[in-house]
Image (cartoon, rainbow, N blue to C red):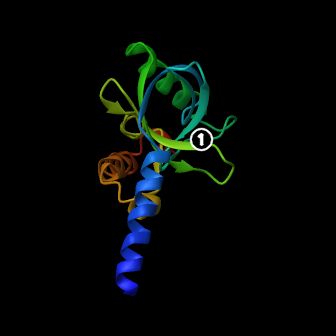
C-alpha cells in the first residue's frame, strides 16, 4: 500500500512540475551577461533567464565581456529566436533554463569558446546528458590553456 501511495504521489509531482515548466519559444531582447538573457515570450512578457549549469566570469572579471559578446553575437546571428527549456529557478528566484538558439545550446557555444565553466554536479542531479559535451569542451580548453584557462 505504501508503495502504491508513493507511486501516485511521485506521478502527480512529476506531472505538476512538467506543467509548470513547459518549453517555449521567444525572442532574445537583451543579453545581460554571457549567461543571463532577457527573453520576450509570445504574449510580450519578458522573462530573465540564467543558463543552466554553467558560469561565466562576473562583470568586471577578465573574459566577462568576451562571454557577453559571444552570447549576443550568437543570438543575433540566428535572429534572436530562442527555444527555452526550463530547468527550475535559482536561489534568487531567477528562472534557470537551457536556451537553444540556431539549434545549439548557448551553454555549448560558450563552453566551446572556452568562456564557461560547467557545474557537473548540477548536471548529474538534473540528469542532463548534454552537459557531458559541455564538460568535454571545458576539459579541452583547460588542457590547451585557452580562454578562461589562458593564464
Q: Does residue 94 lie above or below 34 as drawn?
A: below
Q: At 45% across and 14% down in the image, what residue appears?
A: 76
What residue is rendered at 41% in x and 12% in y?
Answer: 79
Find the residue positioned furthest to the bottom. Answer: 1
**On the image, which quarter does residue 123 sit in?**
bottom left
Task: From the viewer's side, name the closer residue of 25 and 125.
Answer: 25
Q: Residues within 10 Å of mark 1 (few under 14, many from 20)?
A: many
Q: Position of residue 137 (x, y in %)?
A: 33, 45
Location of residue 114 in the rendering, given as x and y in whole percent from the top left corner:
42, 39
Say which residue appears at 54% left-offset and 32% top-offset.
Answer: 34
Residue 115 appearing in the image: yes
Give the residue at mark 1: 57
Q: Nearer the viewer, residue 144 or 20?
A: 20
x, y percent for residue 131: 35, 51
Q: Residue furthest front?
A: 1
Residue name at image x 54 percent, y 20 percent: 43
In this rendering, is residue 108 above or below 71? below
Amino acid at each position: 500500500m505504501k508503495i502504491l501511495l508513493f507511486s501516485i504521489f511521485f506521478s502527480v509531482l512529476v506531472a505538476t512540475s512538467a506543467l509548470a515548466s513547459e518549453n517555449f519559444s521567444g525572442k532574445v531582447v537583451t543579453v545581460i551577461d554571457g549567461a543571463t538573457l532577457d527573453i520576450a515570450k509570445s504574449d510580450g512578457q519578458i522573462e530573465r533567464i540564467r543558463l543552466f549549469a554553467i558560469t561565466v566570469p562576473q562583470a568586471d572579471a577578465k573574459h566577462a565581456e568576451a562571454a557577453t559578446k559571444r552570447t549576443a553575437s550568437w543570438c543575433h546571428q540566428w535572429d534572436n529566436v530562442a527555444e527555452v527549456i526550463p530547468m527550475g529557478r535559482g536561489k534568487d528566484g531567477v528562472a534557470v533554463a537551457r536556451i537553444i538558439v540556431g539549434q545549439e545550446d548557448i551553454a555549448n557555444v560558450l563552453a566551446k569558446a572556452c568562456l564557461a565553466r560547467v557545474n557537473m554536479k548540477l548536471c548529474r542531479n538534473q540528469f542532463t546528458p548534454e552537459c557531458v559535451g559541455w564538460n568535454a569542451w571545458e576539459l579541452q580548453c583547460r588542457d590547451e590553456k585557452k580562454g578562461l584557462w589562458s593564464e
